[in-house]
Amino acid sequence: MKSLSISLSFAALTAAAPAFADVDAQELWAEWQAQIAATGQTMTTESVTETADGLVISGLTTTNVQADVTSTGSIDQVTLTENADGTVSVEMSEVYRIRTQTDAGAGPAFDVSMEMRHQGLEVTVSGTPAARQYDYSADSMIFTTEQITVDGESEGMFDLDFTISDLVAQYLVEGADVDDVSFTSTSELGGVTGTIDAAAPDGEAGNFKLSFNMGATTSSGSGTLGSMAALSQMSSGGVLPEEFDLEGQASYDRLSYEMTFEAPGSNFNMAFANEGGDLGVAFGPSGLTYDLSSENVVSTVQTSDFPLPIEVSAASAAFLLTIPMMPEPEPSDMALRLDYQELTVNDALWGMIDPGAAIPRDPATLVLDVTGQVQMLVNLMAGDPSAFQGPPGELRDVTLNELEVSVAGASLTGEGDLDFAPGQMIPQPVGAIDLQLSGANALIERLVGAGLLPAQQAAMFQGMAGMFARPGAAPDTLETTIDFLPGGGITANGVPLQ
């Protein structure tokens, strides 16, 4: 929420507010003030001066208060110029200042000051009052930290510096009534680079460094001004309305970062890179959805607590989560999907575990796809979830659409359906899950041959498998059905487990 409150002011200045057309500067300024107020912020100016072709607004400051956090954004001058073609140009001072302060309360008081500098920023407003469009572009936007204090004292060094380059964006803001304004946006940027450099205070040893680089990115978003205002006030006890609706998507062609921590007797380094990905977020009446994916992922970790570097890679990685947020008359949809294809680890790590290469080092696969329905009992969009008593909802049904765990030549797959009755203190599913296991005996023989698994434990596993599973149609395959019975009973291949 803190980052949202910091960014709302600048977003209102450069995005939602100026998107008017065929209006003069005075009308634009009036609507601008109305939209800032609609997001729950306050605005002050040192002066507003009328010119022959517009307005000059000096000493503009916006303030956003959320519980114990106060965020301010200030800019020296904004000039609105009416053009001959009916559009309005918006020119801003090079520096936009951001300050975030927290009250001491139960913890220390933080005071963080940042600056955003732009180069080549151009904003042009066009359209009609009911469908206002603005286009803006910038060669770069550079964000830097200026000062950070804790309880009034400087806490070591913390330098943040990141740059957005070659930005082109378009916004369409629709709705003549400020209480009913919706927006859509599209943008492209050439890349984002940045660094974070931190050191311990008072000459103490220890430092942290982070560098990141994101390639060309395209994004889009939509929502309502009222939704943005409600979200910004959540930490102050605000309640999100039922018509709340925000969503956004982005695609990028590469991403990398490196993180290092050093202290006496300890060090840690992590590097990550991929060759592109997508991300999406939707937050509305149907719930909250995160949808992330990336291609050709490589992550490496080196630490003083482990003798070798650990490298993990995947041809693709994906994560999807959908959860309902508020009660409805009927159960609401939920979903979870994890999908990692062609997972591998480095040979050095394999060599520690299996120096004789007895275990197949084929790329692994991990897939879990679950959908279902939940009857929500409380509104998670209404304030602090920690204040709720009892579970927020009850499962009604769960479908295991796909399960696949393939590693070292063995593979476990499964699917099934479970139902849950209302009002259960401890959920007791009724239904069945079908599982298939292939290649397990061959893997066990390799583990025993390599001395990684005692023969007695291998025999115990094979004996239990014969009890709780049945042979499949193909060699070295086992099948079983896990039945969840009314009353809480569970069987595997007809043999009671509970």
Image (cartoon, rainbow, N blue to C red):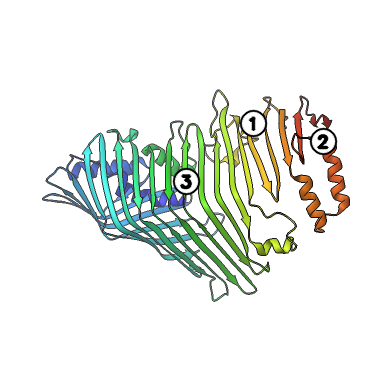
Alpha carbon of mark 2 to alpha carbon of mark 3: how far?
42 Å
Q: Residue at x 68, y 39 (%)?
A: 413
Q: Residues within 10 Å of mark 2 (few under 14, many from 20)?
A: some
Q: Residue at x 55, y 40 (%)?
A: 321
Question: Mark on residue 468?
Answer: 2
Q: Residue at x 55, y 67 (%)?
A: 260
- Which residue is the site of mark 3? 279
* Residue 276 x/y as whole percent: 46, 52
The residue under label 1 is which amino acid type? Val
Q: Earlier in the sequence, mark 3 or mark 1?
A: 3
Q: Earlier in the sequence, mark 2 or mark 1?
A: 1
Q: Residue furthest bottom?
A: 203
**Quadrant into which the C terminus falls:** top right
* Residue 26 x/y as whole percent: 19, 44
**Which image quarter: residue 417?**
top right
| Front: mark 2 or 3 | 2
The residue under label 2 is which amino acid type? Phe
Looking at the rendered structure, the secondary structure element under dot 2 is helix
Q: Residue at x 80, y 35 (%)?
A: 469
**Which image quarter: residue 107?**
bottom right
* Residue 33 in the image: above or below residue 354: above
Q: Residue furthest right?
A: 456
The residue under label 3 is which amino acid type? Leu
